[in-house]
Amino acid sequence: MFVLDLFSIGSLLAHLVTFRACLCYHGEMVIRSEQHTYNGSLPNGDRGRRKSRFALFKRPKANGVKPSTVHIACTPQAAKAISNKDQHSISYTLSRAQTVVVEYTHDSNTDMFQIGRSTESPIDFVVTDTVPGSQSNSDTQSVQSTISRFACRIICERNPPFTARIYAAGFDSSKNIFLGEKAAKWKTSDGQMDGLTTNGVLVMHPRNGFTEDSKPGIWREISVCGNVFSLRETRSAQQRGKMVEIETNQLQDGSLIDLCGATLLWRTAEGLSHTPTVKHLEALRQEINAARPQCPVGFNTLAFPSMKRKDVVDEKQPWVYLNCGHVHGYHNWGNKEERDGKDRECPMCRSVGPYVPLWLGCEAGFYVDAGPPTHAFSPCGHVCSEKTTAYWSQIPLPHGTHTFHAACPFCAHQLAGEQGYIRLIFQGPLD
């Protein structure tokens, strides 16, 4: 399986289904961060294995692994399995005196991809936290992260239907996974070992697929062996949840994977073929601008800036009053000093509330339909289709180690207001 960064050509590949089938394309991971606005790219740009999206293709040579022999520690076979850098293994430390080592053997039918915070070579997709609000290379720094260095691995079948499955924890540079004495672990009914990572790997599969009819599913936790459990009482509790035998670790189009600090969206090749492309979003932007919306007070023409300039407020930028949805150009009147100047009074309807610039949502993978950009998330002002805002406003996304809240998929800001989004009210040209 070879890896390509599809950010620059994602819109083209989204419709080349035949081409993708020839390459045995599995799908893509799209990242939304708990701590930074991505909206289609990383703050410092997509570089190497650090990027806003990651595409999975069939490798030239299979690198998948599957469980094999089980050893009790302190035996020569167990020591050999751990020290052999050509041998994958998982070590379960039950106590200071007892460790179980499970050897993993080569699987010629699967490809393995690994995701985590580590920049070591076994990680295919590097996911890190950044300082909130950083906008450039100079002020973007690493912070104490809750994302595991070797967070999870995805095993993809090399033959149709190219099923992708997720497992907690990834193999390190020595091809080992170590579950320490404090990690939740247990022996299964068939005598095998299983366990959970410190902060866990959570997965949510949407109901009705990832379409305009999608509904949020239930968050589950995935074990090291790929079994499905209800959530623990807290993220790092040692007591595991109840096993959910009727569900599997197989990823579906629109599945969300939470690594405690970053959430990934899984899109299948088939799902992406029905998703609006970047080219389509650009056409919608031009269509809105061609209608020449005007500020209802200043009468100046408004225009959404190019999606390449998504961090720079343009002089023609549309702004919106979040309590009513009336779209204006930027102005200085209406400040409410008693609210520290953060709220404004809309000159159209006199409602008082936040006043923010509008930005088109640039990451096409987050859209559930190809509808026009008529609604905006509150309070960040990211604009997309009505059904896309409605879908994401219903999803309780993990935040920190024990809370959930709905958030904008483009920037991860917690949603506010009754619905979490508003309908935009534009005024057309008077001529």
Image (cartoon, grey):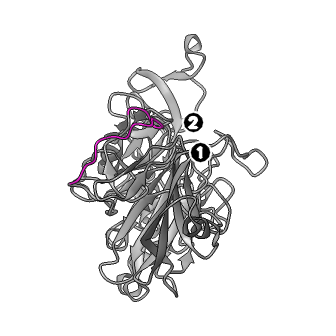
Task: Report the number of numbered marks.
Answer: 2
Determine crowd level at label 1: few under 14, some 14-19, many 20+ residues with C-alpha closer than 10 A.
many
Q: Nearer the viewer, residue 382 or 267?
A: 267
Which of the two discs, 1 and 2, labels the residue nearer the N terminus?
1
Tell me residue 100's x, y (percent): 49, 57
Looking at the image, residue 326 lies above or below residue 12 = above
Judge whether residue 62 can be spotted in this image: yes
Looking at the image, residue 231 lies above or below residue 205 = above
Res 360 label: none
Kindly state the secondary structure of the residue where label 1 is placed.
Answer: loop
Left or right: residue 425 versus residue 103 is: left
Kindly state the secondary structure of the residue where label 2 is placed.
Answer: loop
Looking at the image, residue 53 lies above or below residue 357 = below
Looking at the image, residue 355 lies above or below residue 135 = above
Give the magenta range.
233-245
Tell me residue 178's x, y (percent): 56, 55
Judge whether residue 27 can be spotted in this image: no
What amino acid is at disc 2? Tyr
Q: Which residue is mark 1?
A: 36
Q: Nearer the viewer, residue 295 or 398?
A: 398
Q: Nearer the viewer, residue 422 or 76?
A: 76
Q: Which residue is mark 2?
A: 330
Determine crowd level at label 2: few under 14, some 14-19, many 20+ residues with C-alpha closer than 10 A.
some
At x 36%, y 39%, the residue is: 396
